[in-house]
Amino acid sequence: MTADSRPRLVVLTGAGISAESGLKTFRDGDGLWENHAIEDVATPEGWQRDPELVLRFYNERRTQVRRARPNPAHRALAELEQAGFDVCIVTQNIDDLHERAGSREVVHLHGEILKARSSIDPRLIYPLPRGGIRLGDLCDKGGQLRPHVVWFGEAVPAYGHACDIVTEADLLLVVGTSLAVMPAAMLLHEAPTECPCILVDPNASALSPDWVRAIDAPASQGVPKLVDHWRRRQRLEVPEIF
Ligand code: APR
């Protein structure tokens, strides 16, 4: 419970919540990591070897993100917050669909694709309202710009803040993640022992530890149904409706 005494819903989201907005997940069939080598496009070594390839990969993804629209799952979470619930989203996603749906408290664990960052000073971050990053685009200190995303092998600067948020959760809702990537998957274990946890994912039963309530459903169905339940009851609880 936070200082304002409303029960707090913490939502941990992954690529699956944006799948129905047309953005590919990473590890499903035909996912991004099936068609691109992680070590080429999502590691510091890949960036050193071939920055142009890395920039092209993220420029394409940025174009797709700009075209995508929030789906009923993003919108339901924003509506829950607007209805007066205390909702904080911790997302592994680099898209901005939670913000565009209207959610105000969103922590991006793995960065934001609509921002560029200096490759020599990580404090220099620039919005990218249009276009992409090209080789030769420089920060104010003269260093090449790179995508503002966390690559494999890099630190996750927002992790400590995300832990603080999860330790205050009264209910933890996890949506659309394979829980395959550390340290994000560890966040489940940061929740207080009495905090119930629900996972919404078409593959939830297979992914969930036994203390997690698995809801085998796509995000656009499972999340609005849960939100509707909480709004009608005016409280957060693990429902028996599925
Ligand atoms: N609704 C909900 N979940 C879905 C849907 C859907 N419509 N479609 C697929 N999923 C689920 C899959 O069942 C899977 O469990 O989304 C999950 C996607 O898993 P991953 O592709 O592994 O994505 P994610 O867990 O977000 O990956 C974590 O890995 O490489 C990275 O940095 C990248 O942030 C990403 C991290």
Image (cartoon, helix red, strand yellow):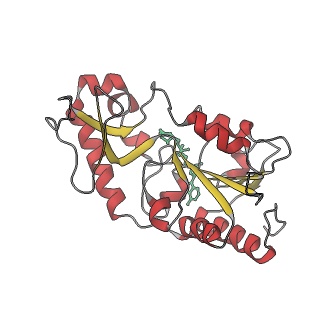
In the rendered view, does 94 fall on the left or right side of 133?
right
Q: In which quarter of the image is residue 73?
A: bottom right
Residue 29 in view, yes or no: yes
Residue at 59%, 38% (x, y): give it.
161
Where is the C terminus found, in terms of image quarters?
Answer: bottom right
Residue 47 image position (x, y, % from top left): 29, 28
Residue 78 image position (x, y, % from top left): 57, 67
Q: Which residue lies furthest to the front in this view?
A: 3
Total marks shown come to 0
Instruction: State whether residue 172 is above or below residue 193.
Output: below
Instruction: State whether residue 91 is above or below residue 220.
Output: above
In the rendered view, does 210 fall on the left or right side of 57?
right
Residue at 66%, 44% (x, y): give it.
165
Residue at 31%, 26% (x, y): give it.
46
Residue 128 image position (x, y, % from top left): 27, 51
Q: Which residue lies furthest to the left in this view?
A: 136
Residue at 40%, 32% (x, y): give it.
38
Q: Residue furthest bottom?
A: 232
Q: Nearer the viewer, residue 184 or 210?
A: 184
Residue 180 in view, yes or no: no
Q: Nearer the viewer, residue 190 or 184?
A: 190
In the rendered view, does 41 fall on the left or right side of 155?
left
Residue 22 image position (x, y, % from top left): 42, 62
Instruction: State whether residue 89 is above or below residue 160.
Output: below
